[in-house]
Image (cartoon, grey):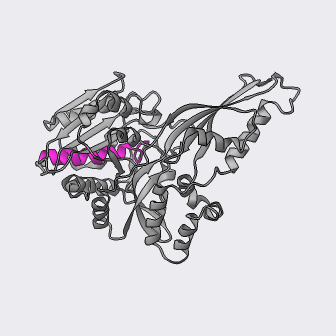
Amino acid sequence: MPDSTIYQRPAELLQALIRFDTTNPPGDEAECINYIDGLLQSIQQETILLAKNPARPNLIARLKGAGSAPPLLLYGHVDVVPTVGQPWTQPPFSGEIIGDELWGRGTLDMKGGIAMMLAAFMKAKVEGTALPGDVVLCVVSDEEAGGDDGAKFLVEEHAELFAGIRYALGELGGFSSYFGGKCFYPIQVAEKGICWMRATMRGQAGHASMPMPGGAIVKLADMLAALGTERLPVHVTPPAQMMLEAMMEGLEGEARAVIENLLDPEQTDAVLDELGEAGRSLNAVLHNTASPTIIQASTKTNVLPGTITVEIDGRLLPGQTPAEMVSEIRELIDDEIEIEIVRADSTTTEIDMSLFDMLADILREADPEAIPVPMLMPAVTDGRFFSRLGIQTYGFNPMKLPQEMDFLSTIHNADERIPVAALDFGTEAIFKAMQRFGEAST
């Protein structure tokens, strides 16, 4: 039988979620979603399960509020990225707690966030918490592979379930991040878009014992070198400018000057070079990015390939188009290389900051050192789909992390883990947001 009190122990709840292997592909989220459904049923909470693919359902539950505020959406995904080829110190689906940290794939992205939301939602239901408006919990499948069976399906086929919702709490944001000796808590208010591409190189095939100058392999090497060492042009978009200016307000001296210089396109890349690894996420919010990820060439050691294809994960800044991305890449690579757009999901350029101050206050109350700032997410989330319904997402899975833990470098990586205390921190912050979202400024 489901444990109806597990919401009081977010770490134990997360352990249970981690132990469902929801690696996407293929996902197979049904068992995990059904577990969450069972927990909600155990506290007499009505739920709806909707699926485009029966093996990949999505769950929706609604708590009634006073009706003095529009409904608030809490959403996130339970699928996770693969662990194959990564040198994990602990088994990635064991959910072990070692010292003060819980280890496993999805602890940060984003079963940890689901555990926080679910725990806060169940607490409000069991305790009869007064809410300014309805709170809608939506747990989806398939975010890590594009969302076709998850959020995209719900938005396109069941939009009526989200009628009247203006604001949502989703991934990723609210985690502590250090720069210039200060503790920032970026809250996502905007995100980049997807521009997945396929590059094709052609050349003369033949016996590998006789190298082919200028063949497809050579073109591949040149393209990988260009994309691996050269940046695409600088773009200081409005959300990036808002983020960096907010950081400047919390900094002083040399650290403040660094951020100020980042805002000058003439100096941006030189500053990023000086920052090195510390500027990796800032680099991604100031440029379109193109990362080669999958290469398909010859199927035999002694055969030179006549055709090579490379899958490229492109991420577009708000307001940029796939055509502009391709044009920027063209400046770096051989004209003979073919580029086709495999998938492009745009993102809105409109930002509604109405809930930001309330969320920022909650973080400052939880951590007096906190400097909340709006964030342009360098990746994409399901927020791009919900934005089609006029819903503003705030990335808000609050986590107070050790200074040595870089959140954005830890997700999708080996040894993903989360401090147990961070789960309690985030659950309480989300619970407070559920009680106070009626304070939204207009």
Q: Say above or below: 128 vs 302.
A: below
Residue at point 51%, 35% (across, down): 344
Residue at point 54%, 41% (across, down): 321
Quadrant assignment for the C terminus: bottom left
Count of labels shown? 0
Q: Which residues are magenta?
A: 105-126
Q: Residue furthest right?
A: 210
**Image location of residue 226, percent across then percent down:** 72, 45
Q: Is residue 67 magenta?
A: no
Residue at point 42%, 50% (across, down): 190
Q: Is residue 115 magenta?
A: yes
Q: Is residue 395 left or right of residue 264?
A: left
Q: Is residue 434 left or right of residue 16?
A: left
User: Which of the 4 image quarters holds residue 45?
Assistant: top left
**Image location of residue 19, percent across then percent down:** 37, 37
Which sits in the foreground, 296 or 87?
296
Q: Say above or below: 216 vs 347.
A: above
Which sits in the foreground, 355 or 128?
355
State whether the magenta stretch is mostly helix, strand or loop: helix
User: Which of the 4 image quarters holds residue 314?
Assistant: top right
**Image location of residue 403, percent across then percent down:** 46, 64
Q: Say above or below: 373 vs 368.
A: above
Instruction: Confirm whether residue 86 shows in the render.
Output: no
Which sits in the foreground, 438 or 221?
438
Q: Is residue 335 left or right of residue 288?
A: right
Instruction: Confirm whether residue 331 shows in the render.
Output: yes
**Image location of residue 168, percent across then percent down:** 30, 46
Q: Is residue 165 left or right of residue 180?
A: left
Quadrant assignment for the N terminus: top left
Q: Residue furthest bottom?
A: 253
